[in-house]
Image (spheres, rainbow, N blue to C red):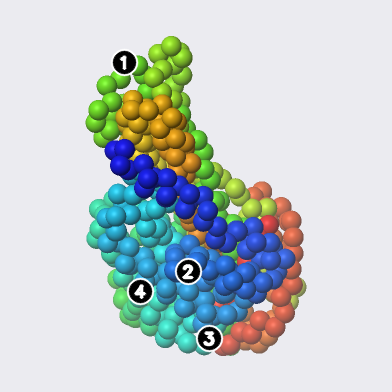
């Protein structure tokens, strides 16, 4: 174990010295409505080797800067890296056990990977390449099926929204069978995840199932859905449809917190893996100093709620018709639930690493007290929590779906707080609606 000390020392200084981009320098121009400046900053501060968090951030700010091709390219790079990292590097895995989880290859969470397909598909929509958007929907569906196949207890976080979104895009393209399949999946996935995400099945899914089964002549299914959802809305002549995705705030970031675990004088710490379960039971426990052999400090990630000022939307068209937004994706809840599910594994791995460092310290201290102090210092410096995530993601996504007469319209957006009270507004002119067509648009606020 003493031979490991030089490696620990080198890694520690490398980790302390690594800079990268500062997230505050990304969100400040976004908050000012200058996504182009955020994009330029991220380009200038790109790591030498492309990595997932940076590519996710670059892809999203490029999307908001209307750099749709550059956005998709960044997301494609992130997706390729994520695929490769499912075969993890053994050397980095071993290194993370004695230094920090930051050395582990970051593959992105399942919901992050799915949401990248949402933005990629929108990029194609805005480039008038609907076929490319449909390919992204099929890629997202394949990814969901992969997640389902890998885990019998797959939580469907993010899957419902992507299936819902895919249904709308297939419907816009006139791919009725694919649209019906996607809407059916969306209804199933929303139901499966609702308890943890807090997002129920949006009403428009029922309407879409009714309209599609009637169009396709599936009489039995139509009757069943009509009993479940009621009569479908009437189709109006010379009307099109607006589908607005309203993205609010930021997903809460992971932060680092220090946890203390007591190692007692009566403990026999010879096998780190066998001793870790005992330590886990001592989280938050307090012992008399006379009983303590060593106080093990470890760095753990944590995440908490950070809701934005705006948590809802109403849209009035030309000062008349008004429609409220429906919550279709609660990214904050998904992020917190995902972390809570992973925390026991992270804690076990962190404590295993911590006990390993303690054993190295104990052996070094027996040989030489100065060497023991240095070893302990290296352990402290190298102890950093893995707080990597896609931080520019919105906190919540709402959908406004409304029929509008063909023509050009002005939208009056009313932004609401969590209690439904008006907290801001914005007017958006020149939204064009074509007859019997769906017009897509996404809008972001950061407050």
> Which label's residue is closer to the chain start, 2 or 1?
2
Is residue 20 visible from the viewing direction of this image? yes
Q: Position of residue 26 (x, y in %)?
A: 63, 63
Left or right position of 225 against 28: left
Does residue 10 lie above or below 177 as drawn?
above
Rounded to the nearest angstrom, the CA distance separating label 3 from label 2 is 30 Å
Around disc 1, counting alpha carbons within 10 Å, would you say few (fewer than 14), some (14 to 19), or many (20 or more)? few
Answer yes or no: do the residues labelled 1 and 3 have beta carbons within 8 Å? no
Q: Residue at coordinates 48% horizontally, 62% vertically from top-left?
A: 53
Rounded to the nearest angstrom, the CA distance separating label 4 from label 2 is 28 Å
Does residue 68 lie above or below 153 as drawn?
below
Rounded to the nearest angstrom, the CA distance separating label 4 from label 3 is 19 Å
The residue under label 3 is 127
* Tag of residue 139: 4
> Which label's residue is closer to the chain start, 4 or 2?
2
The residue under label 2 is 48
| Image quarter of the C terminus | bottom right
Q: Secondary structure at mark 4?
A: helix
Foreground pick, 102 / 8: 8
Answer yes or no: do the residues labelled 2 and 1 have beta carbons within 8 Å? no
Left or right position of 238 against 130: right
The residue under label 1 is 266
Q: Residue at coordinates 41% horizontally, 17% vertically from top-left?
A: 292
User: In the image, which is nearer the foreground, mark 1 or mark 4?
Assistant: 1
């Amino acid at each position: 174990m003493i031979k490991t000390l030089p490696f620990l020392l080198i890694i520690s200084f490398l980790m302390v010295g690594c800079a990268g981009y500062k997230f505050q320098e990304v969100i400040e121009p976004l908050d000012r409505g200058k996504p182009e400046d955020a994009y330029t900053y991220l380009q200038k501060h790109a790591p030498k080797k492309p990595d997932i968090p940076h590519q996710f951030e670059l892809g999203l700010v490029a999307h908001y800067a209307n750099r749709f091709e550059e956005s998709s390219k960044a997301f494609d790079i992130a997706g390729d890296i994520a695929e490769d990292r499912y075969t993890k590097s053994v050397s980095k895995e071993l290194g993370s056990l004695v230094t920090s989880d930051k050395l582990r290859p970051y593959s992105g969470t399942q919901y992050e990977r799915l949401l990248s397909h949402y933005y990629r598909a929108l990029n194609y929509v805005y480039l008038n390449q609907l076929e490319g958007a449909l390919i992204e929907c099929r890629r997202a569906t394949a990814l969901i099926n992969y997640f389902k196949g890998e885990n019998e207890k797959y939580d469907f976080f993010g899957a419902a929204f992507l299936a819902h979104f895919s249904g709308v895009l297939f419907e816009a393209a006139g791919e009725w069978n694919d649209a019906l399949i996607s809407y059916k999946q969306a209804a199933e996935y929303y139901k499966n995840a609702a308890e943890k995400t807090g997002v129920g099945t949006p009403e428009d899914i029922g309407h879409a199932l009714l309209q599609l089964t009637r169009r396709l002549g599936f009489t039995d299914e139509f009757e069943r859905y009509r009993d479940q959802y009621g009569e479908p809305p009437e189709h109006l002549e010379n009307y099109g449809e607006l589908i607005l995705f309203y993205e609010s705030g930021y997903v809460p970031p992971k932060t680092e917190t220090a946890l203390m675990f007591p190692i007692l004088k009566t403990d026999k710490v010879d096998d780190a893996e066998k001793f870790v379960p005992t330590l886990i039971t001592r989280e938050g426990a307090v012992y008399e100093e006379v009983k303590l052999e060593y106080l093990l400090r470890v760095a753990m990630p944590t995440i908490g709620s950070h809701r934005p000022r705006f948590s809802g939307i109403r849209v009035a068209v030309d000062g008349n018709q008004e429609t409220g937004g429906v919550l279709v994706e609660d990214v904050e809840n998904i992020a917190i639930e995902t972390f809570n599910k992973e925390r026991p594994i992270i804690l076990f791995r962190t404590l295993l690493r911590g006990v390993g460092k303690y054993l190295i310290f104990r052996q070094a201290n027996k040989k030489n007290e100065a060497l023991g102090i240095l070893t302990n210092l290296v352990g402290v410096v190298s102890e950093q929590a893995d707080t990597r995530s896609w931080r520019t993601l919105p906190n919540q996504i709402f959908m406004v779906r409304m029929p509008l007469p063909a023509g050009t319209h002005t939208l009056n957006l009313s932004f609401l707080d969590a209690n439904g009270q008006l907290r801001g507004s914005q007017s958006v002119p020149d939204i064009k609606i074509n007859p019997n067509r769906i017009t897509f648009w996404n809008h972001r606020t950061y407050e």
